[in-house]
Image (cartoon, grey):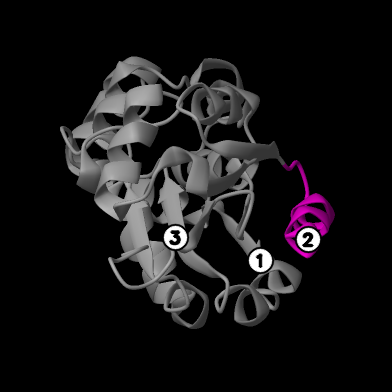
Amino acid sequence: MPGSDSTPPQKVLLLDLGGVVLGIDFRRVFRHWARSAGVDESLFFNHWALDQAYKDQEIGQLDFAAYASHLSTNLGVSMPLQQWRAGWNALWTEPYYEVAALFASLKPRYTLCAFSNTNAEHATSFMLRYPDIMEQFDHTFLSHEVGCRKPSAAAFRHVCQLMQAEPSQVTFLDDNQDNVEGAQSAGLIAHLTRSEAEVVAVLQTL
Protein backbone atom coordinates (compact mmCIF):
# COMPACT_ATOMS: atom_id res chain seq x y z
CA MET A 1 0.00 0.00 0.00
CA PRO A 2 1.03 3.68 -0.11
CA GLY A 3 4.52 4.50 1.01
CA SER A 4 7.65 2.62 2.02
CA ASP A 5 11.05 3.44 3.51
CA SER A 6 12.55 4.04 0.07
CA THR A 7 9.76 5.87 -1.73
CA PRO A 8 7.69 8.92 -0.81
CA PRO A 9 4.13 8.22 0.34
CA GLN A 10 1.77 7.95 -2.59
CA LYS A 11 -1.45 9.85 -2.44
CA VAL A 12 -4.68 7.91 -2.27
CA LEU A 13 -7.83 8.64 -4.24
CA LEU A 14 -10.76 7.12 -2.36
CA LEU A 15 -14.10 7.03 -4.18
CA ASP A 16 -17.61 6.13 -3.18
CA LEU A 17 -19.10 3.77 -5.78
CA GLY A 18 -22.85 4.43 -6.13
CA GLY A 19 -23.34 7.98 -7.32
CA VAL A 20 -19.64 8.62 -7.98
CA VAL A 21 -18.55 5.77 -10.25
CA LEU A 22 -21.70 3.70 -10.79
CA GLY A 23 -25.10 5.19 -11.58
CA ILE A 24 -27.89 4.20 -9.19
CA ASP A 25 -31.61 4.92 -8.93
CA PHE A 26 -33.59 3.48 -6.01
CA ARG A 27 -36.85 4.27 -7.79
CA ARG A 28 -36.06 1.36 -10.11
CA VAL A 29 -35.99 -0.96 -7.09
CA PHE A 30 -39.38 0.18 -5.83
CA ARG A 31 -41.00 -0.01 -9.26
CA HIS A 32 -39.74 -3.55 -9.81
CA TRP A 33 -41.01 -4.66 -6.41
CA ALA A 34 -44.39 -3.03 -7.00
CA ARG A 35 -44.83 -4.78 -10.35
CA SER A 36 -43.75 -8.13 -8.92
CA ALA A 37 -45.99 -7.89 -5.85
CA GLY A 38 -48.97 -6.36 -7.66
CA VAL A 39 -49.13 -3.36 -5.34
CA ASP A 40 -48.95 0.38 -5.90
CA GLU A 41 -45.35 1.61 -5.96
CA SER A 42 -46.27 4.36 -3.49
CA LEU A 43 -46.18 1.67 -0.79
CA PHE A 44 -42.43 1.41 -1.18
CA PHE A 45 -41.80 5.09 -1.90
CA ASN A 46 -43.66 6.11 1.25
CA HIS A 47 -42.77 3.37 3.71
CA TRP A 48 -39.39 1.87 2.87
CA ALA A 49 -36.77 3.27 5.24
CA LEU A 50 -33.05 3.25 5.73
CA ASP A 51 -33.62 1.51 9.05
CA GLN A 52 -31.48 -0.55 11.40
CA ALA A 53 -32.01 -3.73 9.36
CA TYR A 54 -30.71 -1.93 6.27
CA LYS A 55 -27.66 -0.74 8.22
CA ASP A 56 -27.10 -4.20 9.68
CA GLN A 57 -27.02 -5.59 6.15
CA GLU A 58 -24.41 -2.99 5.24
CA ILE A 59 -22.07 -4.05 8.05
CA GLY A 60 -22.40 -7.75 7.31
CA GLN A 61 -24.66 -8.63 10.24
CA LEU A 62 -27.77 -9.49 8.20
CA ASP A 63 -27.96 -11.46 4.96
CA PHE A 64 -30.31 -10.58 2.13
CA ALA A 65 -32.81 -13.36 2.83
CA ALA A 66 -33.26 -12.04 6.37
CA TYR A 67 -33.50 -8.48 5.08
CA ALA A 68 -36.18 -9.47 2.55
CA SER A 69 -38.11 -11.20 5.33
CA HIS A 70 -37.86 -8.02 7.38
CA LEU A 71 -39.21 -5.98 4.46
CA SER A 72 -42.06 -8.41 3.89
CA THR A 73 -43.14 -8.17 7.53
CA ASN A 74 -42.73 -4.41 7.86
CA LEU A 75 -44.36 -3.52 4.55
CA GLY A 76 -46.99 -6.25 4.50
CA VAL A 77 -45.84 -7.47 1.09
CA SER A 78 -45.51 -11.13 0.14
CA MET A 79 -43.23 -12.03 -2.75
CA PRO A 80 -40.74 -14.83 -3.57
CA LEU A 81 -37.18 -14.19 -2.48
CA GLN A 82 -36.05 -14.22 -6.11
CA GLN A 83 -38.30 -11.22 -6.82
CA TRP A 84 -37.03 -9.31 -3.79
CA ARG A 85 -33.51 -10.02 -5.07
CA ALA A 86 -34.25 -9.07 -8.70
CA GLY A 87 -35.77 -5.78 -7.59
CA TRP A 88 -32.90 -5.04 -5.21
CA ASN A 89 -30.46 -5.46 -8.10
CA ALA A 90 -32.53 -3.28 -10.45
CA LEU A 91 -30.75 -0.40 -8.72
CA TRP A 92 -28.10 0.13 -11.39
CA THR A 93 -28.44 2.58 -14.28
CA GLU A 94 -25.19 3.17 -16.19
CA PRO A 95 -21.60 3.51 -14.98
CA TYR A 96 -20.07 6.96 -15.10
CA TYR A 97 -17.93 6.26 -18.13
CA GLU A 98 -16.36 9.74 -18.19
CA VAL A 99 -15.18 9.17 -14.63
CA ALA A 100 -13.77 5.73 -15.37
CA ALA A 101 -11.98 7.13 -18.42
CA LEU A 102 -9.86 9.31 -16.11
CA PHE A 103 -8.59 6.44 -13.99
CA ALA A 104 -5.66 5.61 -16.28
CA SER A 105 -4.24 9.13 -16.00
CA LEU A 106 -4.75 9.24 -12.23
CA LYS A 107 -3.26 5.87 -11.29
CA PRO A 108 0.40 6.85 -11.85
CA ARG A 109 -0.07 9.50 -9.14
CA TYR A 110 -2.68 7.96 -6.86
CA THR A 111 -3.48 4.61 -5.35
CA LEU A 112 -7.07 4.17 -6.52
CA CYS A 113 -9.42 2.79 -3.88
CA ALA A 114 -13.15 2.56 -3.25
CA PHE A 115 -15.00 2.87 0.06
CA SER A 116 -18.70 2.21 -0.28
CA ASN A 117 -21.66 1.53 1.98
CA THR A 118 -23.09 -1.60 0.40
CA ASN A 119 -24.14 -5.18 1.06
CA ALA A 120 -23.16 -8.61 -0.16
CA GLU A 121 -26.05 -8.81 -2.64
CA HIS A 122 -25.28 -5.51 -4.33
CA ALA A 123 -21.54 -6.15 -4.25
CA THR A 124 -21.94 -9.43 -6.11
CA SER A 125 -24.16 -7.66 -8.62
CA PHE A 126 -21.87 -4.75 -9.45
CA MET A 127 -18.74 -6.90 -9.53
CA LEU A 128 -20.40 -9.09 -12.17
CA ARG A 129 -21.93 -6.21 -14.12
CA TYR A 130 -18.92 -3.91 -14.27
CA PRO A 131 -15.73 -6.00 -14.12
CA ASP A 132 -13.79 -3.68 -16.45
CA ILE A 133 -14.37 -0.75 -14.11
CA MET A 134 -14.00 -2.56 -10.80
CA GLU A 135 -10.71 -4.21 -11.76
CA GLN A 136 -9.14 -0.77 -12.11
CA PHE A 137 -9.32 -0.21 -8.36
CA ASP A 138 -6.20 -1.15 -6.47
CA HIS A 139 -8.29 -1.93 -3.39
CA THR A 140 -11.98 -1.88 -2.51
CA PHE A 141 -13.32 -1.42 1.00
CA LEU A 142 -16.96 -2.44 1.19
CA SER A 143 -18.86 -1.76 4.39
CA HIS A 144 -20.27 -5.27 4.74
CA GLU A 145 -16.73 -6.67 4.53
CA VAL A 146 -14.90 -4.15 6.75
CA GLY A 147 -17.73 -4.09 9.32
CA CYS A 148 -18.26 -0.35 9.45
CA ARG A 149 -20.04 2.24 7.35
CA LYS A 150 -19.95 5.89 6.48
CA PRO A 151 -20.43 8.58 7.74
CA SER A 152 -18.65 7.44 10.91
CA ALA A 153 -15.28 9.14 11.31
CA ALA A 154 -14.08 5.92 12.93
CA ALA A 155 -14.96 4.06 9.71
CA PHE A 156 -12.79 6.43 7.67
CA ARG A 157 -9.92 6.09 10.14
CA HIS A 158 -10.25 2.30 9.95
CA VAL A 159 -10.09 2.34 6.16
CA CYS A 160 -7.04 4.62 6.28
CA GLN A 161 -5.36 2.09 8.58
CA LEU A 162 -6.19 -0.69 6.13
CA MET A 163 -4.68 1.39 3.32
CA GLN A 164 -1.63 2.21 5.49
CA ALA A 165 -2.23 5.85 4.63
CA GLU A 166 -2.43 8.98 6.72
CA PRO A 167 -5.83 10.68 6.40
CA SER A 168 -4.14 13.80 5.04
CA GLN A 169 -2.84 11.71 2.09
CA VAL A 170 -6.37 10.70 1.08
CA THR A 171 -8.71 12.56 -1.27
CA PHE A 172 -12.28 11.30 -0.96
CA LEU A 173 -15.31 11.89 -3.21
CA ASP A 174 -18.91 11.11 -2.25
CA ASP A 175 -22.38 12.25 -3.28
CA ASN A 176 -23.64 12.42 0.33
CA GLN A 177 -22.97 15.48 2.49
CA ASP A 178 -22.95 13.50 5.75
CA ASN A 179 -20.30 11.16 4.35
CA VAL A 180 -18.17 14.09 3.20
CA GLU A 181 -18.39 15.66 6.65
CA GLY A 182 -17.50 12.34 8.28
CA ALA A 183 -14.41 12.07 6.08
CA GLN A 184 -13.38 15.63 6.84
CA SER A 185 -13.76 15.06 10.57
CA ALA A 186 -11.36 12.12 10.22
CA GLY A 187 -8.80 14.34 8.48
CA LEU A 188 -9.35 13.37 4.84
CA ILE A 189 -9.58 15.85 1.99
CA ALA A 190 -13.19 15.38 0.91
CA HIS A 191 -15.36 16.68 -1.93
CA LEU A 192 -19.12 16.56 -2.38
CA THR A 193 -19.99 15.55 -5.96
CA ARG A 194 -23.64 15.32 -6.93
CA SER A 195 -23.33 14.37 -10.63
CA GLU A 196 -20.99 12.72 -13.09
CA ALA A 197 -19.96 16.16 -14.34
CA GLU A 198 -19.03 17.25 -10.82
CA VAL A 199 -16.95 14.12 -10.25
CA VAL A 200 -15.12 14.70 -13.52
CA ALA A 201 -14.52 18.34 -12.64
CA VAL A 202 -12.90 17.44 -9.31
CA LEU A 203 -10.80 14.64 -10.76
CA GLN A 204 -9.50 16.93 -13.49
CA THR A 205 -8.09 19.29 -10.83
CA LEU A 206 -6.01 16.57 -9.15
* Mark 3 burial class by Cα count in 10 Å: few <14, some 14-19, many 20+: many
Q: Is residue 142 above or below residue 9?
A: above
Report the residue marked by disc 1: 94
Residue type marked 1: Glu
What span is in magenta?
A: 193-206
Residue 145 percent coordinates (x, y): 22, 48
Please report whichever mark, 1 or 2, sits nearer to the chain's N-terminal start: 1
Q: Secondary structure at mark 3?
A: strand
* Structural distance between the alpha carbons of marks 1 and 3: 20 Å
CB of mark 1 within 8 Å of CB of mark 2? no
**Predominant SS along the magenta part:** helix
Residue 25 visible? The answer is: yes
> Circle 1: is it few (<14), some (14-19), or many (20+) Cα within 10 Å?
few
Give the tally of numbered discs.
Answer: 3
Q: Residue at x 23, y 31 (%)?
A: 69
Which residue lies under the disc numbered 3?
Answer: 113
Q: Residue lying furthest front in this view?
A: 6
- The nearer-to-camera label among 1 and 2 is 2
Decide whether residue 194 is among the magenta residues.
Answer: yes
Choose between 167 and 59: the one closer to the eye: 167
- Nearer to us of marks 1 and 3 is 3
Who is closer to the viewer here, 34 or 6?
A: 6
SS for dot 1? strand
Q: Which residue is mark 2?
A: 200
Q: Is residue 32 visible?
A: no
Quarter of the picture containing the N terminus is: bottom left
